[in-house]
Amino acid sequence: MLKRFLDRLAALLDRRLKTAWLIVALLVGLSTYATTRLHISSNGIALLPQDDPGIKEVYRVTEMLGGIGFLMVALKANDEKHIKGVADDLNALLLKMPEVRDVTYKVSTEFVRKNIGLYIETKDLVEARRRIKKKIKAVIRKANPFHISLSKKKEVKLDLSDLIDKYSKMGKKGITDDYYITRDKKMLLLLIKPRGHSTDLEFTRRLVKKVDEKLAWYSKHNKRGAVLKEAYRKLAKGATVTYGYTGGYKVNLDDRDSIIKSLAPTSGVALGGILILLVIFLRRLSLVLSLTASLVAGVILTFGFCYITVGELNTITAILAGILMGQGIDFGIHFIYRLREEYTDQGDLVAAIRESMAHSGAAAATTAATTSAAFFCVAISDFRGFRDFGIVAGGGTIIIAMSMYVLTALMLLALARVAPNLIKKVLTVKKLASERDAKAAAAARAEAGDNKGGAAPVFGWGRIPGARGILVVGLLLTAAMVVTGTGGGPLKEMLPKKLRRGVTFDYDARSLMVKDRPSIILQQEIKERFQISADPAAVVTDTLDEAKKIYDYFTPLDTKKYSMIDTVISVHMFVPPMERQKANAEVLRKMQKDFKPLKPGMIENKKLKKHYPKLKEALAAKPFQLEDVPAQLRNSFANVPESKIKGYLTFIYPKVALWDGRDLLRFADQVGTMKIGGKTYHATGMAIVMATLARIVLHDGPIFTVMALIAILLIIMVDLRSVSAALLAVVPLLMGVSWMLGTMALIGKHINFMNVVVFPVVLGYGIGNGLYIVHRFRETGSVTLTMRRTGRAVLASCVTTLAGWGALLFANHLGLESMGVLASIGIACVLVTSLTVLPAALQVVEDRRTRKEKGSKQAKKEGQPA
Amino acid sequence: MRIATLGLCLALLFPAVSERPAAAAKDTAFKKPIKVLIGGVRYGKNALAMKMLDLEAMAATMCGSHWSKMSAGQKAEFQKGIGIIIRKSSFKKARDVFKHIDAVLYGKPAVSGEQARIKTTIVIHRAYKKKELVVNWVLKKTGKRYRILDIEMAGESTLKGIHDEEVQPLIKKGGTSLLLKKLKGKVSSL
């Protein structure tokens, strides 16, 4: 039925050529207009399930704080005073920018230092008193000329370093220096809180550019003689201050830019490679140009479809053009190959188009249907990025398949009207012409009953030698690849250690980035020097009481239950429990008495002498309440004044940097949803957002795969109406994917969050190759003829696609490179199985049929039942 | 009548008038050993300064409860050693302080049985800087006069310090023999 429909469609195109062109022009025109109206949304948060509690909280926190995360500028210099002065100046400059909400680079910790005696644990204060008292006694004794010492003694040193280290930070901020500066005083952080969202990449790009301009201006016009240079590893001398960018905003932007930067040259290489290969395979520039024109039109129509269905492009669908073009060109290659064959055989363009569309078109329709089905399965995802991708890719595959057949046919029909000789020149294949003549001669001989030279099959094309052997080798190799790809399963111990892992999911996000990216290296350095592992998750509460409940719940931290949490900070960390304050105040009072007899003149140690007045001040600390804590300290935990949402924030810092997806998921599991004091709270932040995305991918991935396989099998069954034919058609798919996974395991490559989207592409090729070959075999009954004709088209389409995806192997971005690896290996494996194992299997079928036919002929001759 | 009245007045007045010299004489009894000690140390008259110290009582306090367990010979040896150390070391260090004395201000003595405590503020003028050293003296009466038993600086008893930091640990570690050995060693090093 499908073939009949396609045949009639081809006839209609010829009969109503002008109308067809008008319709096409209208559709392409409207789609072009729609394409210009499409914009690329870079807001990644909008792609996630909006009813997810963590995602809802993101919007709340964004409103309360004006954004999540920071743009960090790290300054490095040798001179402490100089670097602090520069930071002061830059703060003033940056605050004038409309894009900047706030800059944090120093916080007055004087209040904490003054009251440190009340913050520390009572047992530690008692221990400090003991050591200080011992030292005071030693100092007094030394000052007493009448004291006698009978044996050599080590000088009593006052060592409080362990206690000082323990309490030198409040939350993540050191209290010995107001600035966000490292201990060695050589690196200082400016945390810029922008007004836009970190997922709004265009905003971030503008912001970084403007900050850059400000720094450059400052470098030339400052009165300190400071010279600012962007450098990520150097610590410069003299007045030079080196700086680098990092933080959530910059890392997101760099990731995106590195993808685009990698894509640009690789796209050029891919396109060039594809065009060159097309010329080599098709040998006619005019055919290449018509295919390209049909392809471009198909892509435009797809974007028009995108405009009607989803309304916009996102960071994932933005790369669809490349994928669809890669697939689309294959439909065109198959069409042209078949068309040239039919034209060479029949010499009539319309008849050739009708035959091609009916036969090759039928296979193409099934291929498009199965590939679309695989893409449409992705459209059920909760992640809008995948959902939109599935819808647009699914619809786009069908649109492009139609475009390649219909538009190319229309172009050739139009060309035939104006330059019929050109058509002959373009579509006649000399090699096929001689084959045609040989076929005619063989048919004539057969009619004449001349079987000398052996009875040849219908067209006299021979057979594939050693088919059974190839099939057995293929099956054994597939078994070996399955074992390797899965890490051995029950046969694990038999494999070398290196291969026992199999192909797994690589959770490490750094495997998806550009190698040695400066902002990541800087982030790592900041983590080590400031001991901040990653951006914290935040919990929003409406009242201070609720914030207190949360803080008390985590203090002290149950490290077994919350193994991924490093520390929890809240406004309440500035107010120690009153019980402790009172107990400590009593100890401090006693320490004041201890110090009474000690006069500054008695102290020889210069450091102790210098800090003596401050020490005495700290001993005078009295218990206090939250209202006594300076506003500057309290404000970091509340909404910004212009926020419409009022509330308080508690920050939860993870123990490790959350590059590893498993750590990410564990952290999100521990803090994503918490029940405290009878109420449920949801932490949010980039870690939680990424975990939500990871969970969707991991959950949906297997579901999509199974659904796609079922859909593919059903469609094939409907098309081929034969279990054996359907099984043959999926040989390249099943074997090809097995070989792909086995090869990846052998070379140590794995699946990750980026290359997982390539799977439907490989599935599409696997099924497409099988369908084209099986369809042709059913038509001709000859494997060798099938492989000579359709096999060439399969080779041409896979090689051109390999050129496209293979260009990604040279991408600097590791995520893109992994996509190139998976696609190249997958398509190559599918191609090899399509050209070896599948023909071998078909040859076995053909031989069986031939034997059956021979047997029944023989029986007829001998008058016996067949 | 007038003579009687005068006599009566005189008789009434006399105790008040005669008390001041008596009080003054009593105060002198506490101040003298301190004055002599400071002066003796200051001007290098060690022998004189040593006489102001109740060395035996000092040695006994330094050894605490262990003193009664020591033999007479050990006691004598210990006392002698302490005396040498005080003379050769303590007096030398004290001289460095005392030679810059500007004034010594005496507080009111507080007597408790055989012991008395008196607070002094020693004003030191050194390199254009004035410093005040508050020293509490503990005196013990032996016979008719008071001698210095202990010196407290910044609330810390010198004898208690020596007992806790020096003598007690040595006795705990190696008994009287170790104590005397260390004492000998210290003496020979001076």
Image: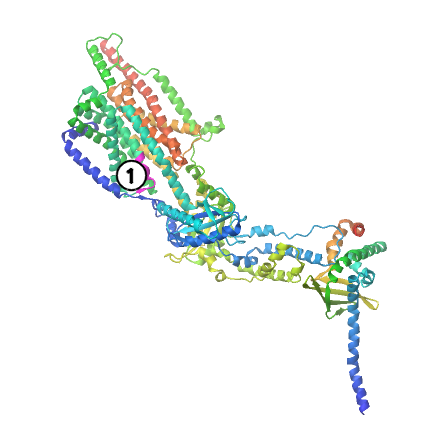
- Magenta highlight on residue A404: no
Q: Which residue is mark 1?
A: A391
Q: Please, what is the dominant secondary structure of the magenta stretch?
A: helix
Q: Amino acid type of disc 1?
A: Ile
The magenta stretch spans which residues? A313-322
Residue A235 to residue A638: above or below: above
How far from the left and from the top, in percent, is residue A731? 33, 25
Q: Residues within 10 Å of mark 1 (few under 14, many from 20)?
A: many
Q: Is residue A765 left or right of residue A613?
A: left
Q: Is residue A401 visible?
A: no
Q: Is residue B65 left or right of residue A515?
A: right
Residue A137 to residue A701: above or below: below
Q: Residue furthest top?
A: A452
Quarter of the image containing the N terminus of chain A?
top left
Q: Quadrant of residue A502?
A: top left
Q: Is residue A629 left or right of residue A48?
A: right
Q: Quadrant of residue B2?
A: bottom right
